Image: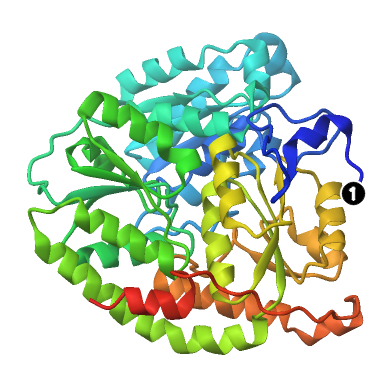
Amino acid sequence: MISLLDQRKPQVHVTGAQPFAMACDKQSLAGSVSQRACVFCGSRVVLYPIVDAVHLVHGPIGCAAYTWDIRGALSSGPQLHRLSFSTDLQEKDVIYGGEKKLYQALVELIDEYQPKAAFVYSTCIVGLIGDDVQAICKRVAAEKNIPVLPVHSEGFKGTKKDGYRAACEAMFTLVGTADTLGIPRTSINILGDFNLAGETWILRRYYQEMGVDVVATITGDARIDDIRRAHGASLNVVQCSGSMTSLAQMMKEKYGIPFLKVSYFGLEDTAKALYDVAEYFPENPAILTRARTLVAREIAAALPALRHYRQALAGKRAALYTGGAFKAFSLVRALRTLGMTTVMAGSQTGNAQDYDHLRQICDDGTVLVDDTNPLELAKFIQEKQVDLFIGGVKERPIAFKLGVAFCDHNHERKIPLAGFEGMVHFAREVHDSVMSPVWQFTRRPAETIQPPALPGGTGIAALATEARP
């Protein structure tokens, strides 16, 4: 094991070691250069894909850099979410306040773009100078007759996870403000998918084929009017549990809508998600029948390519670092389907239950890390002789500097990785990166590693058998 700062040791665990006790849900260690993002980033991640709203960053211009087209969140209509708006607070505004500037910006933007709503993000400096953002939003909402929603996302208030909650609280004020006429009993909301590279459209297609109506997608390719009537759905299906569970809980408490936590990454998890939703409507058995037909067809179409990629990838070692831990579960299973072993796994925002589950599904000797930093990541990649690193834009340079293949599984990607076809895209990207001839000039001498044995009930063959209707 590499040397760690004493304060960081409780946030690292090696599976198989006893006892299991992993610290998490805590502030980043000062000076450790955490990979985490701030509260503002978390709120922006969640709300950005609402395509018919104005998104105004109240703060210095630098914060607005986290806006224009940095994500692959696509829209089937309006492109307003791709524009970057900021009040551009200067030194004079810090002294005298930025409320007048905020009011003027909101009025001009609403007059120019005629949005369905406006979100105003408070940044660090706004929290320090004490602008009454809520009062300005209330005033403009009354004058313009549209929702103008303050997002209390001052970056210093916590972590990215706190930003998720701030975004959910802002959205929750919209839910329940429109009628639910015409929404059928067999209806759901898709929460926590952000339509990266069009993934929400893939999921919609699956549910439409099953006979399940999708009321709102929150927030991939989202519309304000759909969010306002989302309380009419029978079930919330939560993909990114870290970002959207709080909204699902609020809707359950106020409107009695239950929710399921699912994942659409990998064959097994996608199939289970569709089956779980179908089984929620036992009064309509045709939905489950159609789900079985869909799953069997899609898996049969995917298997030939996956077998081909598995032949080359079996025995390779992978490390992964995600925003939320729920995605890490799916990636461990998806990599196992490709014959690969996960030797390091971590997240920015996982909780104790997440890491306990991750420990159970990983092989002994896997390093689990919470809120890690570039130095730790680099050292673990070297120590574990990793062939592939899965992460986001901040992790890519670490992999390439070490001569390790990389797969972008975060918000910047342009290829859909969700659903059955997404698993094929994922396998192809992993294969093309790991097997690239460029690594012969950078990589350590290859070791002989035996392909891992797949436990019963997992892997391609087992899943293909289980998926038959």
Residue placed at 71% from the left, 42% from the top?
A: 18
Residue placed at 57% from the left, 51% from the top?
A: 360
Residue 448 versus residue 70 in the image, above or below: below
**156 on left or right of 80:** right
**450 on left or right of 99:** right
Badge 1 marks a residue whose secondary structure is loop
Identify residue type, mark 1.
Answer: Ile
- Estimate the x, y position of residue 392 in percent, counting from the top left: 66, 56
- Res. 85 image quadrant: top right
- The image's colouring method is rainbow
Residue placed at 82% from the left, 83% from the top?
A: 438
Badge 1: residue crowd in 10 Å (few <14, some 14–19, many ≥20): few
- List the residue tagged with mark 1: 2
Q: Is residue 174 visible?
A: no
- Estimate the x, y position of residue 81 in percent, counting from the top left: 46, 47
Residue 159 versus residue 396 in the image, above or below: above
**433 on left or right of 415:** right
- Estimate the x, y position of residue 344 in percent, counting from the top left: 72, 56
Figure label count: 1
**419 on left or right of 259:** right
Question: Which of the two residues, 154 or 464, is positioned nearer the viewer here?
Answer: 464
Question: Which of the two residues, 194 or 462, is positioned nearer the viewer here?
Answer: 462
- Estimate the x, y position of residue 342 in percent, counting from the top left: 67, 63
Q: Is residue 458 visible?
A: yes
Q: Residue furthest front?
A: 18
Q: Quadrant of the C terminus?
A: bottom left
Question: Which of the two residues, 333 or 184, is positioned nearer the viewer here?
Answer: 333
Residue 94 versus residue 444 in the image, above or below: above
